Image (cartoon, grey):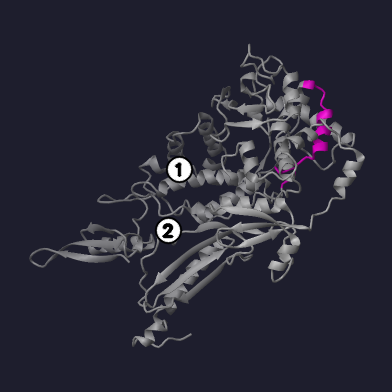
Amino acid sequence: MATVQGRKNRAGEITSYRVKWREGGRRDGDWQSETFDDDTSAGVFCEAVNEAGQQWPPGWVKGRGYIAAEAGDDDRYRFRNFATRSIEDKTGVEEHYRVACMRDLERYVFPTFGTSDVRSTEHFSRDTVRAWVRQLEQTKVFKGPRPKVGEPKWRPMSPKTIRNLHGLLSSILQEAVTAEPPLRARNPCELTRLPRIDDDGAEDGEDIEFLTPDEVEGVISCMERRSDQLLSKVKYGTGMRWSEVTALAPQCLVDWATAKPVIRVKRAWKRDGEGGYYIGMPKSKRGRRSIRVSLAVVEAIEELGGEDLDNPDRLYFTGEQQQRLHYSTFHDRWKRAVLRAKAEGLLPKHKNPTPHDLRHSHAAVLLSEGRGLTYVQRRLGHESIKTTSDTYGHLLPEADDEAMAVIDRSLGRTTPTADEIQERAEETVDHSRVHVVHFETGHVEAFWKAGDARTVADQWQLDNGQSTRVETWAADWWRRQQTNGLKGVRDGLPNRIRLWSMGPAVYGPDGAEQASEPGVHQPRDRWVWEWEADYTQESAHSRSEWRPGPRAETEAMAWGLDLVSVRAAYASARTDALRICSLHPALSSQGGREAVG
């Protein structure tokens, strides 16, 4: 806690008052101080330090005083100015990103917070940010350009867009928190509960539409232009992004005449920030990749001119004037093909795929045939495997055929016979073998499906950075090794949750907080599987308990699924720990107070 100390001269007279505290209230925190001429000012400042959690009050400049948020004579901290400067000064980003950020700020953030002061806890608080998020949830938007005739199709803003806008606001306020000196004590965006991306209640939302191989073939067959059919085949057969596939040129072909042809993804259309486009590098470092392609893709490229050494930069897919093929132009033709496919019974009525769903469907068919998440991540060019896991992790692998053969079959090179289709439909899980995942901790999990075991092994490595090993054993041998026989062998993927935790805060018998690891009071998250001890389905748990030993320490911690609830539970647990710390049983043996339960 901050305290006020009178400073005396040699005659013993108090000449000034000093407010002194340890930063953050930690026992090992650096000493901080500020000096005042009168005790009243020192007392007001002391209270402000304590309210800020033993930190410098937001907006206070050492030696100069508090710059009041309502002063109005310094526009640097008006959110519009602060945010604009933040975006303009960002390094390592493309100009298009800068333009997009400013566009979103102008449309959705400045109308609410533009004149607010980044230092003000009244202007930016949990309540004001929550009210802004609720306003976004009620905002109607439309996709694509405004139609020339009639009204566009309005719909509620998607949860993903809301999260992106909230992240933009949060990043700017975080700069105010980390400024030197800090302009704010904390970022109020951390306290906001956002709509789930996988729970979009909007009509015609942004849910991914996975197409079966037959449905892909059906839509392609309904396209009028041969060039559109070939583009769709290449996009589905490679999983490339629109900006990448439309920048494809002969220079991207590697080992084209061999048995293992490859497309090197090294070009993509980029926005220049002024409404134009240019060919640059792909989206990220992992976006620059080499993709092994099937013979069906090779045939499509060959029909478009193939390995044209005389024109290595020639685009395979262009518009009417041989310029960049606009997505909107292709999308119009794609929508007509989708309608025809539905009319002819080649596509279910409830499915409304976009061209980008060819990329999703490419990933789905590979996963369904037993390829791991890491393989799919590298093929799609995701910077993080978490993106791959979050998008496709729910798809269950069911077989173990070669990926290239799957793509070929999907694109119509070989058509399964009626007997083969019936055979696949009658396939059952092989109960003669058990696929076992071994973890570094010594724990094991058994699965009937090899694909399930590989998925869990891959995901565990992603979550924990620990190696795993998958082994296959005869089911009869495994049954004899286990006390519960085959009852523990899983038929599907186990549950996995994102767990938030805080603490432990540790207190001595006098209520003084003991030295702890940095960040112990900050929320931490990790993924937990259903077989782990911390697994829960509750929003929050808390615990306050005595630690064994002569030091008579008491600890408090909290964990659960909901961050806001965990924060509240942690605060309550710390209060309980302070209440019981003086009653530690170890104190009775040391001549202290008698402990009570």
Circle 1 sits on which residue?
A: 79
Q: Secondary structure at mark 2?
A: loop
Q: Main secondary structure of the magenta part?
A: loop
Toward the top, the furthest residue is: 310
Q: Is residue 124 left or right of residue 533?
A: left
Q: Nearer the viewer, residue 78 or 363?
A: 363
Residue at left offset 92%, top offset 40%: 418
Amino acid type, callout 2: Gly
Mark 2 or 1 closer to N-term? 1
- Rendering quarter of residue 388: top right
Percent x, y for residue 95?
Answer: 50, 29
Measure the alpha-carbon separation of dots 2 and 1.
28 Å
Quadrant in which the N terminus appears: bottom left
- Rendering quarter of residue 360: top right
Residue at left offset 68%, top offset 34%: 239
Circle 2 packing at 10 Å, graded few (<14), some (14-19), many (20+), is: few
User: Which circle marks residue 553 in the picture?
Assistant: none
Q: Is residue 132 left or right of residue 338?
A: left
Amino acid type, callout 1: Phe
Number of marks in picture: 2
Magenta-highlighted residues: 202-226
User: Which circle marks residue 519 in the picture?
Assistant: 2
Percent x, y for residue 23?
Answer: 32, 59
Residue at left offset 40%, top offset 43%: 77
Q: Secondary structure at mark 1?
A: helix
Percent x, y for residue 288?
Answer: 57, 31
